[in-house]
Image (cartoon, helix red, strand yellow):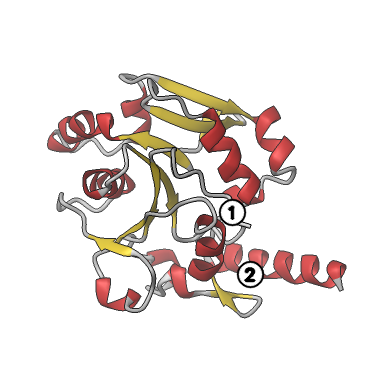
Amino acid sequence: MSERRPNLDCCAIVLAGGLNTRMQGRNKAFLEINGRTILDRLLASLQSAFSEILLVTRQPDQYDGYPLRLVADIYKGRSSLTGIHAGLVHAKAAFGFTVPCDIPFLQPGLIRLMLDELEPKLDVVVPFYDGHYQPLCAIYSKRCIPLIEKQLASSDYKISHLFERIRIKTVPIQKLKKVDPELLSFLNVNTPASYDACRQLAAERLSRRE
């Protein structure tokens, strides 16, 4: 059964513009875990909640055949903030739930929680735990665009600096753990070691179900 909320003006934005240097240049979106690419696993979670999904990339030819709107960075600097900016500029929706392409365990419950926390007046809804924001699993308003552009014009790529000038709502760990007890949604594949750890975790969870 679809979990989409068509009256909620929010799309999904997947960031896939990194250089993947710590993965020896391998595109993390296409790394496999239990026989499925990370991107396929991510889309399985997003497609039940969003009718519009954008992917920000500088290599659009690699994503032929995927049910995605492919968009490119507008600013030359390569950073997560330039990707967020591009996604928001191209989005039809007023808000964008932004995630990186290297999180294999995004939980549907976490998506629902973030959407439930969204209010029209807010500029950003962001998870917060262990003293840190999780800015790459957050919802951004298109109202952020001019502020991001001002930052990028001064070569300031730190996302937390944006949070100092907007209406922000943090989602605390107590709420996060109610829908994602192990905080699996925030595990990413940045290095060969983290890739091995995610594959081992997926294999263990699969064996427990069998």
Instruction: Report the front residue among 75 and 109.
Output: 109
Is residue 12 positioned above or below 204 on the image?
above
Corner quadrant of residue 196: bottom right
Q: Quadrant of the C terminus?
A: bottom right
The amino acid beneath tag 1 is Leu
x, y percent for residue 21? 37, 66
The amino acid beneath tag 2 is Asp
Check disc 2 and report its element: helix, strand or loop.
helix
Instruction: Report the front residue among 175 and 194.
Output: 175
The numbered mark, 2 or 1, whose residue comes first in the sequence reads 1
Corner quadrant of residue 172: top right
Residue 165, numbered label? none
Measure the alpha-carbon separation of dots 2 and 1. 17 Å
Crowdedness of circle 1 by 10 Å Cα count: few (<14), some, many (20+)? many
Q: In this rendering, would 51 be left or right of 71?
A: right
Q: Which residue is mark 2?
A: 196
Q: Which residue is mark 1?
A: 106
x, y percent for residue 195? 58, 67
Corner quadrant of residue 140: top left
- Give the residue displayed 51% in from the left and 70% down from the top: 40
- Give the residue displayed 36% in from the left and 78% down from the top: 65
Nearest-to-viewer mark from 2 and 1: 1
x, y percent for residue 188? 54, 56
- Give the residue displayed 62% in from the left and 58% down from the top: 105
Total marks placed:
2
